[in-house]
Amino acid sequence: MADNTYDAIVVGSGISGGWAAKELTEKGLKVLMLERGRNIEHVKGYVNANKDTWEFPHRGSKPTQQMLKDYPVLKRDYPLNETVLDYWVKDKECPYVETKPFAWFRGYHVGGRSLTWGRQSYRWNKWDFDANGKEGIGVDWPIRYEDLAPWYSYAEKFAGIQGSKEGLDVLPDGEFLPAMEMNIVEKDVAARIKEHYKGQRHMFIGRSANITEPKPEQNRTNCQYRNRCWRGCPYGAYFSTQSATLPAAMATGNLTLRPFSIVTKVIYDKNTKKATGVEVLDAETNKTYEYKAKIIFLNASAFNSAWVLMNSATDIWPEGLGSSSGELGHNVMDHHFRCGASGRVDGYDDKYIFGYRPTGIYIPRFRNVYSDKRDYVRGFGYQGGAGRSGWGSKVAELTIGGDFKDALGEPGNWSMGMTAFGEMLPYHDNKISLDKNVKDKWGLPVLNMDVEIKENELKMRKDMIADAKEMLEAAGVKDVYTYDSEYQVGMGIHEMGTARMGRDPKTSVLNSHNQVWDAPNVFVTDGACMTSASCVNPSLTYMALTARAADYAVSELKKGNI
């Protein structure tokens, strides 16, 4: 547009940024979406989507010595993988400082981590929104479940969430497509858990953003059961920016997408007390540009949105835009996990599974609900599943010959496992800050991570492990073993909380509509806005919050209030 001026600017193109672009363009605004990384086009850009294992130079799964050297952060967990290496940030180009260990897994490209997310999609329950206020932890959420429920429905209908209706207070039902099926072992284990715990614990198919019916209006085909989601789906069968929100935004004719655009600051006018636009560093040319807009949506991911605000320091806000409360960068949360139990399931030798289902089972929270009380607050849920081990279990030392060939076609024994995901509390001293002594490839200051789990989470982990073992044994699983793998904050890839919502500008960064208290035409609707973490995957909540905030922003813009 002329003079680099738009109605709205969206910073970031991941799950929340894609939603912001869709909603704002569909409401008639001319929108500029800025993405710091390269463009990845739907279908054409998914270069590994149809490759078989043997087509990768190193067979895909195990990292090479060179990869381990080049990706010192990514190698801490499963994301370091030949099949999706191009979807992750090069650690050496984008360093950060760890006062305490923090695993920060980033995707800088159009679509962000919407291409690689786990797709688990759950509504929060009513207790999740009022727990802080009732327990005196952090600050009270400025909204309740009832405020977000219609927006959950709105997001679910568009994104496409498969799942079963269970009628549980602890995990509200949504607008679901037909559910994927549990396999025979999972069904039996679920029935035994329900019987043993007298209907107080539940296990069902994990709700995921994989469509089980076509969405022709979005040019999306139902899931093909390939379980190669994170390589990018050429069928558009899972929700991503590329498959769903970006095409919708582009179809309006109101969207301009600019990749390789690092937003370095929000430009603030102290006379009007509003933002006027953003400063952009071109990642390829290192040239600086300014873009102007009436409203700005920060959706750069929880830490990078906070980084932008911090780097937007002025003489009025020396610690950054939105820092007047002293809470900007604080209250970092993730979901702690990497612990649980697994064991052998006897029988079912004549049963197998269909395809490669892209979701597992889910067991919703049962601790600290109703009459249950523990020596910690909040709770956890489980993800997992049952399956048959590979042909290797049949081979023993035989690695050549006819017996080996025969074994290739035989499935191994059944096993069942579950991993817990626990809620992390919002501690003020868990924080990120700008470290101006360390610079990235572009000469920009990096983040310093000072975050850890504390006593409440450590107590919870004991139950996360013990309860998994107890449930599996109650369901007849044999030789059950427990595990507690090394967890570093960040490994859940659910970082949130750096610019929390609240009721008072003295104790929060954002109000009930995701507006920055200090600049009402700036909105933050990604993980940065979260006031607490619940124990369920957060992306669906980001979608709902973004759609709600965009609706409010456009309404206020039309009224002349922002």
Image (cartoon, grey):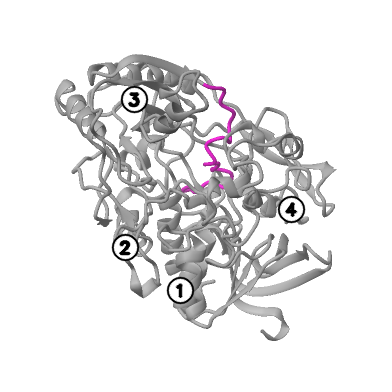
Front in this rendered view, residue 354 or 361 = 354
Instruction: Report if residue 448 lies within the magenta region.
Output: no
How far across and down, in percent of the image, does residue 96 sit?
74, 40
Q: Residue at (55%, 41%) from the top-left corner?
A: 495
In this orientation, does residue 462 appear? no
Front in this rendered view, residue 6 or 477 = 477
Q: Is residue 201 left or right of residue 249?
A: left
Tag shown at residue 413: 3
Structural crowding at the residue carrying mark 3, measured as other residues with C-alpha within 10 Å and reported as few (<14), some (14–19) or many (≥20): some
Q: Which residue is mark 2?
A: 157
Decide: marks 4, 1 in contact (CB < 8 A)? no
How far across and down, in percent of the image, does residue 471 sit?
28, 20
Ranked by sequence position, the earlier of labels 2 and 1 is 2
Q: Is residue 107 left or right of residue 351?
A: right
In the rendered structure, which amino acid carries the disc numbered 4?
Answer: Asn
In the rendered structure, which amino acid carries the disc numbered 3?
Answer: Asn
Q: Which residue is mark 4?
A: 311
Q: Residue at (35%, 55%) from the top-left corner?
A: 148
Ranked by sequence position, the earlier of labels 4 and 2 is 2
Ranked by sequence position, the earlier of labels 1 and 3 is 1
Q: Provide the residue span drawn in magenta.
A: 485-505
What number of labels is visible? 4
Structural crowding at the residue carrying mark 4, measured as other residues with C-alpha within 10 Å and reported as few (<14), some (14–19) or many (≥20): many
> What is the C-alpha distance between the residues marked 4 and 1?
32 Å
